[in-house]
Image: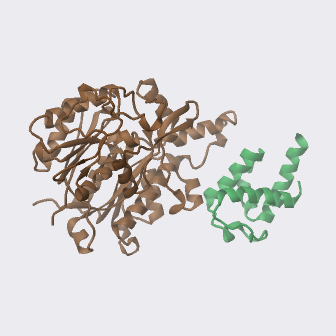
Chain colours: A brown, B green
């Protein structure tokens, strides 16, 4: 028996260069990045992708104070996605709604803050916040969202490193197919810009980007790339089974076509192109497609010197020959690495291509690294495509987790 | 420190803990929980802020003394003054 068809019926996002899908898309087409200089405890001045959505649009001041930034981003994205979808939550059985949010990490920000807090009181732990535990549990962003919405269905986070944004969607689709819920809010979020430890960790690895001009700092595939720009952000989708979406006359952005999640089983941080190729091939097979059917590939590429090369090697093995209609782009060149939100946000940036047939480029490629040359790589300027029916979204993470998600143009 | 000054300090703390509330109409003799949206975590916040800002300790057995602004003033003013006397 075929599995239920799953569709995306709403999008809510917070990106460093856009507070909603249309702002985000406009800036992707105009080549406008969202990276800025920030000042961090112990690190000093560095670069990050910061969001500027109004947290008080949906939350009260007390909610923002008591909760976490990841919670705030999740609530904003969930409310935006629900409004976009036209779902009336008040007349929806709230025990049949699920919230599935991918995160790379959670709890780091709060713990760093609390240690800094008690350092001012001679490390006396009686000054440690009673909010620490609910703020640091790994399900915090999903839990805060369920609290805010009054959702009594399942609400939890999926830890999948930098692949988490794809995993949020994949897991949501799986839960809908199992009949666990009727409406899913799925995607990923990141509050990583508030954790100095994450920046310091990348810096110690030699993987933190630097540049005198912030919007140019994230440079996947460029010869002068020198590492990652850490970003915050979020993107949550409303996902439903097709028959439910049609029953309420929902607008449909795209349909889930296929996916694969696998593991490198090789190294803590270095990617394995063989396993990445396998992940992409299996996702394409899962969707019942061949590589030449894919019209847009959003690469994971984070602008590390080696990681970009490994991914290009993996993609060359799949798309290197006989894929004249396959275009390849990257979103991190605009928004940096949005960690748990990356996969979900990057997919959103390409979704409007189903409507306008324009493929956004990857920017900041002044001098393409020959080791990153790929047929169909869209550099610096958007390109018009004859057709856009299938989009492949890659996200790879530490400890070797790989995810490849394919969405397709919805045809009834 | 007078009791009125003490009530003002407590209201300043509550203004940070409950930033959406209008505190101008708070009645000093009525329980705070009956006038404002304050839960048990918020009261722990009041205890924590007294500790962090003023070095005042409120043992768990005395939490009910913080029920209203009047009872806060009754309970806390001597504590403030004891600390001031020591320094």
Q: Is residue B11 above or below residue A283?
A: below
Q: Is residue A265 above or below residue B48?
A: above
Q: Quadrant of the C terminus of chain A?
A: bottom left
The answer to whether residue A385 is seen in the rendering is yes
> Foreground residue, A300 or A162?
A300
Question: Residue at coordinates 12% horizontally, 48% vertically from top-left?
Answer: A293
Q: Is residue A371 left or right of residue B21?
A: left
Image coordinates of residue A300 in percent, x first then y, are 30, 39
Question: Residue at coordinates 42% horizontally, 41% vertically from top-left?
Answer: A105
Image coordinates of residue A148 in percent, x first then y, are 48, 62
> Foreground residue, A97 or A358?
A358
Q: How many marks?
A: 0
Q: Quadrant of the N terminus of chain A?
A: bottom left
Image coordinates of residue A14 in percent, x first then y, are 43, 52
Image coordinates of residue A21 in percent, x first then y, are 37, 56
Q: Is residue A27 left or right of residue B76?
A: left
Question: Residue at coordinates 47% horizontally, 45% vertically from top-left?
Answer: A191
């Amino acid at each position: 028996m075929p599995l239920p068809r799953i569709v995306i019926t709403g999008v809510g996002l917070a990106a460093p260069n856009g507070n909603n899908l249309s702002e985000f898309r406009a800036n992707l087409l105009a080549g406008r990045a969202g990276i800025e200089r920030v000042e961090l405890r112990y690190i000093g001045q560095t670069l990050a992708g910061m969001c500027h959505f109004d947290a008080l649009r949906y939350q009260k001041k007390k909610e923002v104070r008591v909760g976490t930034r990841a919670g705030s981003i999740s609530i904003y994205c969930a409310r935006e996605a629900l409004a976009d979808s036209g779902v009336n939550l008040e007349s929806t059985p709230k025990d049949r709604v699920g919230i599935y949010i991918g995160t790379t990490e959670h709890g780091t920000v709060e713990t760093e803050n609390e240690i800094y807090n008690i350092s001012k009181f001679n490390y006396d732990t009686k000054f440690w916040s009673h909010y620490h535990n609910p703020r640091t549990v790994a399900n915090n962003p999903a839990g805060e969202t369920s609290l805010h919405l009054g959702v009594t269905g399942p609400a939890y986070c999926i830890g999948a490193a930098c692949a988490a944004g794809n995993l949020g969607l994949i897991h949501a689709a799986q839960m809908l197919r199992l009949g666990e819920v009727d409406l899913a809010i799925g995607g990923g979020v990141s509050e990583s810009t508030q954790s100095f430890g994450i920046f310091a960790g990348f810096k110690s690895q030699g993987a933190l980007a630097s540049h005198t001009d912030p919007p140019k700092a994230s440079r996947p595939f460029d010869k002068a790339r020198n590492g990652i720009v850490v970003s915050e952000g979020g993107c949550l989708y409303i996902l439903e089974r097709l028959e439910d979406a049609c029953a309420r006359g929902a607008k449909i952005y795209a349909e889930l076509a296929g996916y694969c999640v696998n593991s490198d089983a090789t190294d803590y941080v270095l990617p394995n192109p063989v396993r990445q190729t396998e992940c992409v091939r299996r996702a394409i097979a899962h969707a019942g497609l061949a590589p030449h059917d894919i019209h847009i590939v959003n690469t994971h590429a984070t602008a590390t010197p080696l990681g970009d090369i490994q991914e290009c090697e993996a993609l060359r093995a799949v798309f290197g020959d006989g894929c004249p209609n396959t275009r390849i782009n990257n979103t991190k060149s605009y928004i940096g690495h949005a960690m748990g939100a990356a996969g979900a946000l990057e997919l959103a940036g390409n979704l409007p291509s189903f409507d306008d047939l324009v493929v956004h480029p990857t920017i900041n490629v002044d001098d393409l690294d020959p080791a990153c040359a790929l047929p169909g790589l869209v550099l610096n300027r958007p390109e018009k495509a004859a057709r856009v029916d299938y989009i492949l979204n890659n996200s790879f993470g530490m400890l070797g987790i790989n995810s490849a998600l394919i969405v397709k143009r919805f045809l009834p | 420190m007078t009791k009125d000054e003490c009530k003002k300090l407590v209201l300043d703390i509550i203004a940070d803990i409950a930033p959406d509330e209008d505190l101008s109409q708070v009645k000093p003799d009525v329980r705070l929980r009956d006038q404002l949206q304050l839960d048990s975590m918020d009261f722990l916040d009041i205890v924590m802020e007294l500790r962090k800002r003023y070095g005042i300790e409120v043992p768990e057995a005395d939490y009910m003394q913080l029920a209203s602004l009047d009872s806060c003033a009754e309970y806390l003013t001597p504590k403030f003054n004891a600390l001031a006397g020591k320094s």
